């Protein structure tokens, strides 16, 4: 793993997968290989395109440092190139760097278990068939031709983001290995459970079942964590106090992304300013008028044909000055400009990436809902800033801020760029009446105390200080529960699966410096240039919206898991952080929920079985 490998194309990924499924430090299962995506130092930045999103850039800088310069798309060859698809052209080597991991492999014929540099494994590639790239056992005495070896399906990891090959030699010899170990990994049953898998040494005859690495015995047989970071090709200089934990290759807890996102909100009010915002990624390198004149000879600035060089230069300077002022305003969070745009849809500047239209609020809902906005076009940019292992970011902190020692870095040095992706889509924004929510919250102070106590127990169980800090309040529970109920309902008709719809909760109690917020945005997006087809935003129409709210609330009255769901107690020793909610009624896919299915309670919405909570909707 620490040795350089020749460059070979081994597969394809979508850009969005590098943020959600197979980002830096994650393992990718290929047909015959298992590889890990490497750190930023191994990436070729010459083919990257910057993404212009100033608010997100400022937010990421607050997390990873002021040295950060840009957000970038992953490196991709130009599709217009005549050499596209030619494996012998240099452009075919452009991509995301990976290296084999785990480094230990097993021969399926003779059960030999050894690292790739053992001397008996050879890499085989086929120019036009990247999916057939594989390692073979060249001198296997139990196969007529060299068999394809398989990655060992056992690894070790820890809560600080470290991961390594399973310590096979140490494990089978109980810490005292022989001089020339030759290991075999055999499965004695058909189920593949750890109780039926045995590792043995041909040299000294030592044997051990894999079950010892996963049960209580693991504490005495597993060595301490060696703080290895294979994606950075090094070991953590700070070391690691944790014990190694055995995990399976492909386990869902092997990699959790830590991301930040923002919605594009146009600032320019004239046509030229909007064009500068739209093409800022191409205009950012222009620092003098002479460079601008040279750029105008290329197709990059074809959209500015109606403007003079002086007009374009002044617009670029104004944009740069505005961004500088915005980045210094650290007291404004990332959601405030979005909220201001949504509650003033008639004043918001429209562009090809942002368009709002206010819809009439249905008469029966006017008491509690102030505004419904049809979000016809929207663009979201999301950046990867780190990752965790074993514990998800939602398990480490309920507000999404992962402790520094738990966050695995993307590079050995502070990064000057981070991988990002954008999606274009549509959605529905709903603004609630603050007076109605405030009155309802006063009538449910007892329920808020129960949630606050559960919140403290949840943080106490994870050693997150202060125990009572970052409590979102009962208002957030209401908005979050309504968001999930409506999300589950509209997914039945809008044409998008529930996992494709995301929520964005705007909740803030009145503050001396910041305005209060009470609203939700349900949106979806696609990574192509056109976005989505309008199936979600069309449900903001008055009749459709009222019907879906009616059906969503009615479905919350009774759950298939009642009475267990309705009687769920908030006090569970820090295990759960929700009231009457479960997979049958309110839980949403992890890609949809911004709080990991915490702070949910359907009894705050409408009367449920045996509930003492005053519901928000009558």
Image: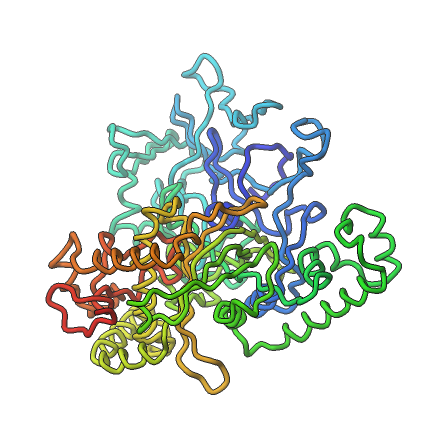
Which x, y percent locates residue 483? Answer: 34, 61
How many numbered circles does the render carry? Answer: 0
Which x, y percent locates residue 316? Answer: 76, 64
Which x, y percent locates residue 281? Answer: 69, 56
Residue shown at 45%/67% (left/top)?
A: 401
Locate the C terminus by quadrant. bottom left
416 or 276, which is in the foreground? 276
Task: Please tell me in which quadrant of the rendered image residue 503 appears.
Answer: bottom left
Farthest residue, direction bottom: 512
Image position of 599 (left or right of 5): left
Residue shown at 20%/80% (left/top)?
A: 446
Which x, y percent locates residue 516? Answer: 43, 79
In this view, 30 is above or below 544: above
97 or 72, which is in the foreground? 72
Task: Please tell me in which quadrant of the rendered image residue 595 appears.
Answer: bottom left
Locate the N terminus by quadrant. top right
Farthest residue, direction right: 290
352 or 108, which is in the foreground? 352
Image position of 173 (left or right of 335): left
Name the colour scheme: rainbow
In this view, 585 is above or below 607: above
Image position of 479 (left or right of 104): left
Residue shown at 39%/56% (left/top)?
A: 541
């Amino acid at each position: 793993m620490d040795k350089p490998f020749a460059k070979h194309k081994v597969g394809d990924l979508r850009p969005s997968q590098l943020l959600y499924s197979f980002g830096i430090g994650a393992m990718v299962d290929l047909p015959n290989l298992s590889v890990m995506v490497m750190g930023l130092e191994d990436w070729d930045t010459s083919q990257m395109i910057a993404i212009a999103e100033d608010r997100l850039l400022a937010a990421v800088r607050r997390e990873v440092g002021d040295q950060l310069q840009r957000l970038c798309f992953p490196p991709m060859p130009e599709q217009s190139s005549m050499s596209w698809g030619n494996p012998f052209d240099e452009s075919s080597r452009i991509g995301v760097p990976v290296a084999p991991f785990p480094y230990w492999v097993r021969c399926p014929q003779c059960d030999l278990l050894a690292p790739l540099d053992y001397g008996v494994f050879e890499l085989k590639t086929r120019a036009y068939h990247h999916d057939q790239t594989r390692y073979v056992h060249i001198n296997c005495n139990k196969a007529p031709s060299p068999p394809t070896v398989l990655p060992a399906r056992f690894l070790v990891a820890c809560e600080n983001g470290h991961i390594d090959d399973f310590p096979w030699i140490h494990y089978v010899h109980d810490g005292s290995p022989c001089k020339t170990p030759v290991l075999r990994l055999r499965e004695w049953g058909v189920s593949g459970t750890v109780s039926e898998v045995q590792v043995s040494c041909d040299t000294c005859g030592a044997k051990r079942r894999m079950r010892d690495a996963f049960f209580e015995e693991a504490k005495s047989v597993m060595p301490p964590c060696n703080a290895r970071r294979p994606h950075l090709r090094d070991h953590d200089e700070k070391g690691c106090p944790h014990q190694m934990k055995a995990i399976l290759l492909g386990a869902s807890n092997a990699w959790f992304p830590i991301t930040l996102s923002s919605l594009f909100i146009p600032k320019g009010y004239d046509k030229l300013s909007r064009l500068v915002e739209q093409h800022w990624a191409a205009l950012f390198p222009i620092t003098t008028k002479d460079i601008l004149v040279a750029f105008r000879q290329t197709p990059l600035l074809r959209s500015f044909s109606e403007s003079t060089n002086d007009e374009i230069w002044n617009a670029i300077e104004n944009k740069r000055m505005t961004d500088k002022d915005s980045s210094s305003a650290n007291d404004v969070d990332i959601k405030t400009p979005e909220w201001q745009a949504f509650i003033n849809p008639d004043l918001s500047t429209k562009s090809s990436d942002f368009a709002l239209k206010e819809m009439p609020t249905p008469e029966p809902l006017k008491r509690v809902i102030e505004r419904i906005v049809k979000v016809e076009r929207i663009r979201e940019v999301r950046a990867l800033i780190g990752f965790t292992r074993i514990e998800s970011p939602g398990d480490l902190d309920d507000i999404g801020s992962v402790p520094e020692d738990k966050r695995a870095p993307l590079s050995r040095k502070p990064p000057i760029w981070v991988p990002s992706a954008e999606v274009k889509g549509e959605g529905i924004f709903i603004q609630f009446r603050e007076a109605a929510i405030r009155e309802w919250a006063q009538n449910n102070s007892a329920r808020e105390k129960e949630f606050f106590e559960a919140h403290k127990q949840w943080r106490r169980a994870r050693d997150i200080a202060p125990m009572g800090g970052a409590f979102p309040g009962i208002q957030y529970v209401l908005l979050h529960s309504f968001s999930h109920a409506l999300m589950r309902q509209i997914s039945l008709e809008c044409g998008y699966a529930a996992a494709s719809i995301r929520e964005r909760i705007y909740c803030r109690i009145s503050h001396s410096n910041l305005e209060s917020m009470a609203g939700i945005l349900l949106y979806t997006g696609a990574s192509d240039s056109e976005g989505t087809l309008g199936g979600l935003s069309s449900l903001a129409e008055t009749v459709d919206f009222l019907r879906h709210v009616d059906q969503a609330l009615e479905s919350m009255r009774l759950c298939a898991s009642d009475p267990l769901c309705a009687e769920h107690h908030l006090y569970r020793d820090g295990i759960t952080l929700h009231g009457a909610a479960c997979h049958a009624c309110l839980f949403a896919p992890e890609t949809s929920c911004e709080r990991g299915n915490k702070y949910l309670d359907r009894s705050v919405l409408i009367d449920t079985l045996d509930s003492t909570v005053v519901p928000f909707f009558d």
